[in-house]
Image: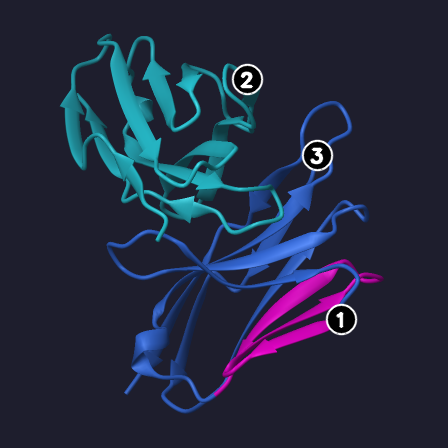
Amino acid sequence: DVKVTQSSRYLVKRTGEKVFLECVQDMDHENMFWYRQDPGLGLRLIYFSYDVKMKEKGDIPEGYSVSREKKERFSLILESASTNQTSMYLCASSLRIYNEQFFGPGTRLTVL
Amino acid sequence: GENVEQHPSTLSVQEGDSAVIKCTYSDSASNYFPWYKQELGKRPQLIIDIRSNVGEKKDQRIAVTLNKTAKHFSLHITETQPEDSAVYFCAAIDPYQGGSEKLVFGKGTKLTVNP
């Protein structure tokens, strides 16, 4: 059974803080993704990675960076958090792009 | 890049009725179309997917149809039940030639099944 876990369910940070969101999957999946979910906007891809130390920008990468030092772990970094980054962040992993994406439980981030 | 439009944004049906959600995509090279269901407070989960070499796929009360000429695909749920109430997302592969392929999601449809 695939398990994707995220480091926090809820997080409150202040404007300007550096924020780390971590995602770990235990199924040896090649692909990992970070999405942002906002009401009425669906799931928007921030960054993705198809291999260790590889990363590609998604549709809304501005203000974010990522790190993938190990296959099972994919971190999302907000270098200087802003209030417009208040959102639900979902991590996902898949074996291949044409396979099911398994999502984590999400991190609801509030930036004050 | 790929653009996926999803309609309607909300849908309310009576238990036992059918529900249809439609998505259109922009890139004719797209060849994979999954549907995800997200129940309230839970993570999205794949419920069905279709590839471009197939026109229709069924799984019990759920079916997906694909019209490549018109560039649209639809989710059909028959004999709806209250547990079908959720947000449904369609998606399509963005066959971006300058980088790696990725999924692009529609904005979602909130389906409510009234008992």
Quadrant housing the C terminus of chain A: top left
The residue marked by circle 1 belongs to what chain?
B
Q: Are marks 1 and 3 on the same chain?
A: yes
Is the Cβ of the residue at disc 2 closer than 8 Å to that at disc 3?
no
* Residue A110 figure quarter: top left
Which one is in front, B68 or A100? Answer: A100
Q: Which residues are magenta?
A: B55-78
The hue of chain B in the figure is blue
**The residue under label 3 is which amino acid type?**
Gly
Q: Position of residue A105 (x, y in %)?
A: 27, 44
Q: Are marks 2 and 1 on the same chain?
A: no
Which structural element holds mark 3?
loop
The residue marked by circle 2 belongs to what chain?
A
Tag 2 residue: A54
Disc number for residue B1: 3
Asked whether residue B73 is drawn in magenta, I would say: yes
**The residue under label 1 is which amino acid type?**
Gly
The hue of chain A in the figure is cyan
Q: Residue at x 16, y 34 (%)?
A: A10
* Residue A38 figure quarter: top left
